Image (cartoon, rainbow, N blue to C red):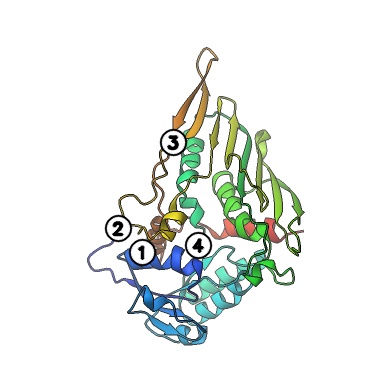
Amino acid sequence: MNLTADSRPIVAGLLAYGMSGKLFHAPFLAQHPGFALRAVVERSQKRMAADYPAIISYGSADELLADPAIELVVVNTPNDTHFDLARQALLAGKHVLIEKPVATSAEEVRALFALGRQQGRQVLAYQNRRWDTDFGAVRWVVESGQLGALNEVHFRFDRYRPVLSPKVFKEDAARPGAGLHFDLGAHVLDQALSLFGRPEAVEKSFATHRPGSQVTDFFTFHLRYPHGLHVWVAGNMLVADPGPAYVLNGSLGSYRKDRTDPQEAQLLAGTKPLDAAYGHEPSGQAGHLTLAGPDGALATTPDAAAPGNYLELFEAAYQAIRHGQPYPISEEQLVWQLEILAGS
C-alpha cells in the first residue's frame, strides 16, 4: 500500500450495516491504514458497535452527511436508492463509494459523474468482483495471450435459491434495479467489460422461474465483439449443480475455471483481510489450461490462482481520493454496464 507518512487517513461513513457493510466494507476500511471508519447509519437496530465499539451510529443519512469530519460516504443501501443518496452525499461535499449497480440507468451514471466533477469529488464504483481470486486467474490467462485469438467466452454466476429473498427491494418488480441481472449480473458483466471493452452488439434474454417471483431470476447477455469474439454472461437462481464459472476458447487452447474465490466465506468466518490465509483458494481448485503444442498435441495443466483481496479496491479508492490517481473502474465502463442492464 502506498501510504506516505504525511498522508491523512480518509474519514469514512457507511450508510448501512447489513451484510454488505459488515462483510464487504467495514473490515477493509478498518484495516487499510489510509482510512478511518467513523460512523454508520442505523435507523433501528444498533448492531455495529458490537464489532466496532468506537463507531458513531446515526439515525438517518441526513445526520451522517452533516458530519463535517466525514470525507467518504459508502452508499451500500438498496439499488434504487443509490442515485439519490450518492447525489445528496456529493452535494454535501463528500466523495462517494457506491455499491453495484451504481445507479439504475446510464443517465443516472452520467449525472453522478457530472456532479462529482462539478463538486470536485470522486465518484467511485464498488465492483469488488474484479478482485476475486478466480477472476484474477482468468484475467491473467487472457492478458497473457496463451489462448491465441479468443472466439467463445462464457462467464456465469449461478446459485440455488428457490425461496424468495427476505430483502424486499430485491423481489419487488416495481422498484428500479430489482432482479438477478442487477444483482449478480452487475458483477459478471463488469468483469467481461473490464476485459473486452464495449461490445458491438448485445442480445438479451430474461426469465422468471421461482414460485411467486416477480423479478428476473435468469438472464443471459450475448456480447458480440469484432473479429468473431462472442461472450456470454449469464446467471440463474435455480442451479443446484453449477458447472464452470469461466470457460474461454481460443485458437491456441482453452481455459476452464470454477467459482473458487474464498473471500466471502472467509469474511463470514471472521478472517480479516490482512490475515495470511486471506484470499487463497483451497488446494485442488486450480483452473484447467489446455494448450496446443508446436506439433498440435494438446496438453492440460493445472493453473493455480494468485490470492485475491478486495483490499486492493480500497487501495485504488485511497489513491484516487488522496493522490488523484485514475480509478480502475471508469465512468464509460459503468455507462456501458447500465446501458446493457437497463436498456431495452
Q: Are marks 4 and 3 in contact (CB under 8 Å)?
A: no
In three-dimensional space, the C-alpha distance between marks 2 and 4, rounded to whole angstroms, equals 20 Å
What type is the residue that disc 1 sits on?
His
Establish if 80 lies above or below 242: below
- Per the image, label 1 sits on a secondary structure element best described as helix
Label 3 element class: loop
The mark found on residue 323 in the picture is 1
Above or below for 314 versus 250: below
Q: Look at label 2 and name its amino acid.
A: Asn
Q: Are marks 1 and 2 in contact (CB under 8 Å)?
A: yes
Closer to viewer: mark 1 or mark 2: 2
The residues tagged by marks 1 and 4 sit, at their Cα atoms, a distance apart of 19 Å
For discs 1 and 4, the disc positioned in front in the rendered view = 4
**Discs 1/3, front:** 3
N-term mark: 4 or 3: 4
Rate crowding at label 4 as few (under 14), some (14 to 19) or many (20 or more) other CA atoms within 10 Å: many
Which residue matches tag 4?
Answer: 126
N-terminal of the pair, mark 1 or mark 3, is: 3
Q: Which amino acid, by three-letter code, is at mark 3?
A: Gly
Instruction: Indicate the position of residue 186 as horizontal and vertical percent values.
Output: 60, 57
At horizontal 53% and vertical 40% (from top left) the residue drawn is 258
Tag shown at residue 284:
3
Mark 1 or mark 2: whose residue is earlier in sequence: 2
Instruction: Identify which amino acid the numbered label 4 is placed on.
Output: Tyr
Instruction: Give the quarter of the figure containing the C terminus.
Output: bottom right
| Residue 187 occupies quadrant | bottom right
Please, which residue is most extreme toward the top here? Answer: 295
Marks 1 and 3, how far apart at CA: 40 Å
Horizontal relation, residue 312 to residue 88: left or right:
left
Q: Please state, as top left, top right, bottom left or bottom right, where the N terminus lies in the image.
A: bottom left
Which one is nearer the viewer's eye here, 80 or 320?
80
Question: How many marks on residues?
Answer: 4
